[in-house]
Amino acid sequence: MNTLRCIRAGLPIMLTALTLGLPGLSLGQASTSPANGEARDDADTRAGFRVYFEPLRIWLEPDVFWYRWADQNKAFLWNGAAQAPEGPEVEDGQMFILESEAGPCLLVRKNKRWRQAGIVYGWPERLRNYGGCASLTPAE
């Protein structure tokens, strides 16, 4: 009877199929989104690729992704320079965009050391090697 009421009420046939319990159909079968930090080719960008920013579900250029990531995580972001800031005012969790001849690289303060954000957060190699990050030696 429930199936007939659904059809009479004008609900989609999919709902009727789900009510009947047909194999292969499930409310939980949604397409999966890319992982945060996942990279895909995009020849129209300076970097040649874009990075998926999961909180907004959009693809961004790597530089923009880094700034959005820092903002999303409410991190204090030091202004870009050629040398990372040091001293008692620098705390774990703060972020810094290193500006080098090779390009920018997002660093995050962890365990009182500056580390590549891509390594700390497990982002793909393509993002970890973007810009100035490729020329940095990972901290042990």
Image: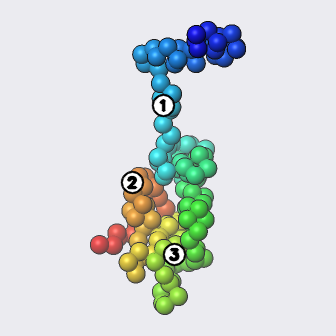
Element carrying mark 2: helix
The quadrant where residue 78 appears = bottom right
Q: Name the residue under label 1.
A: 28
Q: Position of residue 103 (x, y in %)?
A: 52, 65
- As drawn, the residue found furthest toward the front would be 1
Q: Do the residues labelled 1 and 3 touch (CB within 8 Å)?
A: no
Q: Where is residue 113 in the image (x, y as percent from the top left)?
A: 39, 79
Mark 1 belongs to which amino acid? Gly
The quadrant where residue 140 appears = bottom left
Choose between 43 and 27: the one closer to the eye.
Answer: 27
Measure how far apart labels 1 and 3 are at the Cα level.
Answer: 38 Å
Looking at the picture, the colour scheme in use is rainbow
- As drawn, the residue found furthest toward the left would be 140
Measure how far apart labels 1 and 2 are at the Cα level.
Answer: 31 Å
Q: Name the residue under label 3.
A: 94
Instruction: Compare marks 3 and 2 and give the one earlier in the sequence.
Output: 3
Choose between 41 and 68: the one closer to the eye.
Answer: 68
Mark 2 belongs to which amino acid? Glu
Element carrying mark 1: loop
Mark 3 belongs to which amino acid? Gln
Crowd rating for badge 3 (residues with CA inside 10 Å; few <14, some 14–19, many 20+): some
Choose between 118 and 8: the one closer to the eye.
Answer: 8
On residue 80, which mark appears?
A: none
Measure how far apart labels 3 and 2 are at the Cα level.
Answer: 22 Å
Instruction: Compare marks 1 and 2 and give the one earlier in the sequence.
Output: 1
